[in-house]
Image (cartoon, grey):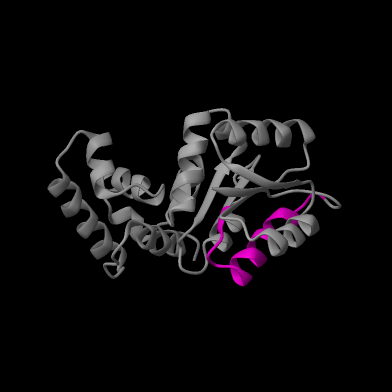
Amino acid sequence: MRVILAEDSTLLREGLVRLLLEEGHDVVASVGDGEALLSTTAAYQPDVIVTDVRMPPTHTDEGLRAALEIRRRWPEIGVLVLSQYVEKRYAAELITGDGERVGYLLKDRVAQVGEFLDALDRVAAGGAAFDPEVVRRLLARTTHTDPLAKLTPREREVLEKMAQGHTNAGIAESLYVSQSAIEKHVNAIFDKLGLATIAGYSRRVLAILRYLGS
């Protein structure tokens, strides 16, 4: 795939470039700020962009704002955001839209090369990839009026897997249960959360995280 990297740490940026080249991907550009990310995306039209959240000049949300602009202007381009911390508001804002071709990973996850590459592939293929820790933080936003309190422990476990972007078959395999059992849990989750059944796991992720971010 054709990739653009945006990361202000030269060491991490060059490491990611080398990793992706070794995996056979085409890194068409690597930049260190949000403005350069937008201009190179317009010029090269990559399959996926990988960007940090905090970049120069203010080191606040330049990368995120560029990512959101890319999703608005070029929805066919996958966006994989890297962050040092769990930014709850940013994660919720990022997935506003159709929930496809989007991911959010903590930078620690990049050290797990296989997981990073898998997330990149899923985003490029039109799916979603969210860091388990990001999902756990979002799921922790519960109050006495939160419908999540209605879920059983197993349903919460399935919901977390769903929010990470896994299919029913993948959840069944990871939890060592049948796919039909997972389908029953999924239906129960959507009933309890008042969410309509939506075809495609990335759309389910969108519905769940929209609710969690509300």
Which residue ends up furthest to the right in the rendered image? 57
- Name the one closer to the observer, 155 or 5: 5
As for residue 60 lying within the magenta part, the answer is yes
Q: Residue at x 77, y 37 (%)?
A: 9
Where residue 37 sits in the image (x, y, percent)?
74, 56
Q: Is residue 140 visible?
A: no
Q: Is residue 165 left or right of residue 94?
A: left
Q: Residue at x 61, y 50 (%)?
A: 87
Q: Residue at x 61, y 70 (%)?
A: 72
Q: Is residue 74 left or right of residue 196?
A: right
Q: Is residue 107 visible?
A: yes
Q: Is residue 93 above or below residue 84?
A: below
Q: Is residue 5 above or below residue 15?
A: below
Q: Is residue 213 left or right of residue 18?
A: left
Q: Residue at x 31, y 47 (%)?
A: 156
Q: Is residue 95 left or right of residue 158?
A: right
Q: Quadrant of residue 46?
A: bottom right
Where residue 180 sits in the image (x, y, percent)?
13, 49
As for residue 72 lying within the magenta part, the answer is yes
Count of numbered tags = 0
Question: What segment is highlighted magenta in the picture?
Answer: 59-79
Where residue 171 sits in the image (x, y, percent)?
27, 42
Where residue 55 sits in the image (x, y, percent)?
78, 48
